[in-house]
Image (tube, rainbow, N blue to C red):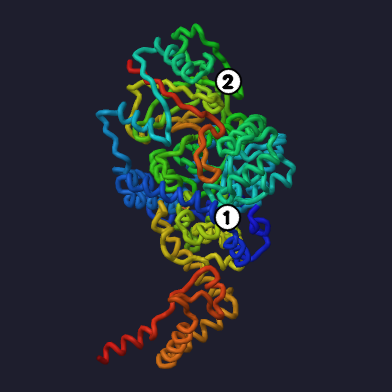
Amino acid sequence: MSSFTAKADTATFKERTDAALADRILKVAVERTAGTAETKRGIAVAAFPDFDAARDRAAAIKDHVVAHLGHYLEMFEANAVAAGAKVHWASTADEACKIVIDLCKAANAKSVARSKSMLGEEIGLPHALAEAGIGRVETDLAEHIIQLADERPSHIIWPAMHKTREQVSALFKAKHRSPHEEETIAAMAESARRQLRGEMLGADVGISGANFLIAYTGAICTVTNEGNAELSLVPPRVHIVTAGIEKIVPSMPHAVHMLRMLARSATGAALTQYTTFYTGPKRPGDRDGPEEMHIVLVDNGRTKMREEGLAEMLRCIRCGACMNHCVVFRQIGGHAYGGTYPGPMGSVLTPVFDGLPQSRDLAHACTLNGKCQEVCPVRIPLPTLLKGWREKSWREGLEPTSMRVGLGVWAWVASRPALYRFGTGIAVRAMRLLGRKGWIDRLPLAGGWTQYRDMPRPAAQTFMAQYNKERRK
Amino acid sequence: MSARDAILSRLKSTAPGPIEAEAAALLTAPERPAVDESALEAEFLARLALPSVNASHDVIAAMADLPAAIARYLEGQGEHLTLYLPPDPRLATCDWTGFTLHESAAPDEAATLAIARKGIAETGSLVFETSPQAPMLPNFLTLHHIVLLAVKDIAPYLEDAPLPGVQPRAHYWVTGVSGTTDIEGSYVRGAHGPRFLHVILLRD
Ligand code: SF4
């Protein structure tokens, strides 16, 4: 196990980041998957006619839905109920978990098969199932790996991105009934296939999220490349869906547009291998399918986001592109962020779920280079939203005293030009003394900055001093 | 107040209607990959061969040729002539002599036949619906997913896939085999479900 994952839940953001930066194995693992995803997305987007216009359309579709969210949720509910599904509503994560657990108990469920859902992680469903004594089979391969390792997902598309093949191999050898013998990734996947097939088919309840909820038909859509959603959701007697209320799209053609954007942004494919729309439970004469279908519509802070300046974040389709392209994520991986959702989108969402006092560091960890916004298929202005959290943190007095005092002193000096120029002139000369071969690799009072970076040795004079000299010539 | 009322009371529309017209306007001339509609079969086959879809194919001239085409494929794969057939009356007209047919799919079924309602040229997708004649699970349990598709049923775009009106219980698109990149981003076929996808085109 990577050294930092063990303390991810208790350590501060700075401690987690320090541990992640010192973990060389982690960096290799993250780079392998995120690097490939970045390349593949680039190729897919370049081959698509006018991806930028398609992003405008995707953003407009989501904005339209968010503006009329109540209207569409009622329409979705009416159509899902007409198809025989039961629709439940939950304001909070706890309410949502309680509904799911009660449904599992009513179905006498001993074990549930779960198809990967970030909403499930967000509301703490794995924990709630464990507390209720209900067995849980994670059927997505990556979720299976982290279930065996007793860890949390580190990425929303590749939850086990932080694990190397050697670590996965050791885990499967320790926990699978008939583990692989050959040390190849194919043999490891085969070992998981053998292990999971029976467990999936024996589950009493199948639990999934939804990538989209189709208002006009009452269908819920799941997408997977593994086919594990279908294997988890068709055999059990009961299918429970937990979905965020923002997952709505009006019609199937709207879903088609969003699916084109999702697959290309996430993995660079034109479409996921398996895309399924479920409308209600088994029909008369059907040979398979669940007898009951329940859909839990979860708010958990979303109505508040819509009211309080974060409506744009409700466009998010959980593609993961922003984290794959984030320089910070690529250095520290997902666990260091400490929330359910990592990377840029996680840094915007975590304060909503965990509170700003606990998560104000996340907005500060961003370099604001804007790469996330450039690749986001629904054009979420992530840097602007992160700046919003920084400002709020300042307004609410959450910044540490040292930062407030430091900035106060700076503001006092900066409003006195002569004093400011005098001070920067001294600083430049002092920094030149510390530079070796053109670089500064250690700086007093800024050890945190120079521990992982070098800084170019500054020019002999400040810019203003050089400018004034040139002007006088 | 119930959670439903609490949520809906905070979600009044923030923009003027008419909502339906606005939703429809968002679909005008969608950006999508170009498909040559005069060469749908060639376009479909080109997508089917992409590494991400990774399907093989064969062509037959009549329904009567289907068993021979399936036998050809299974023998080529070194498999027995054992096959799960869905209870679809169109398949009853074929002569299945030489095959061991399964009426229900075993958890480790080797080969399964399914009839696609449509093929989509844009992505090489196969479109299915559940019905009493078309169970869903066998298509995910099997190692070899064999799919019959009539050439006349190939449509250009994903927008052409759904049925109008009342929806079937499950409507699903298959665009390749069960694959995973969950270990170090490296691609493995046959993660949970089919490892092979073979499409038999009926050019009737
Ligand atoms: S914020 Fe944008 S890029 Fe990031 S996961 Fe959401 S949709 Fe994808």
**Which quadrant of the figure contains the C terminus of chain A?**
bottom left
Three-letter code for the amino acid on which mark 2 is drawn: Ala
**Residue at 50% across / 30% down in the picture?**
B170
Q: Nearer the viewer, residue A332 or A183?
A: A183
Q: On residue A457, which mark appears? A: none
Q: Which residue is mark 1?
A: A26
**Within-10-Å neighbours for mark 1: few <14, some 14–19, many 20+:** many
Front residue of this view, candidates A231 and A106: A231
Q: Given contact means CB atoms under 8 Å apart, are the residues at marks 2 and 1 in contact?
A: no
* Mark 2, secondary structure of its residue: loop
Q: Is mark 1 within 8 Å of ligand 1?
A: no
Q: Position of residue A36 (x, y in %)?
A: 45, 48
Can residue A338 be seen at all in this image of the molecule? yes
To which chain does the residue with label 2 belong?
B
Which residue carries the number 2 mark? B105
Please say if A455 is above or below A190.
Answer: below
Q: Is A357 left, or right, of A365 in this rendering? A: right
Left or right of A259? Residue B84 is right
* Amino acid marked by disc 1: Leu
Quadrant of the rendered image containing residue B125: top left
Residue A379 location in percent, x, y?
40, 56
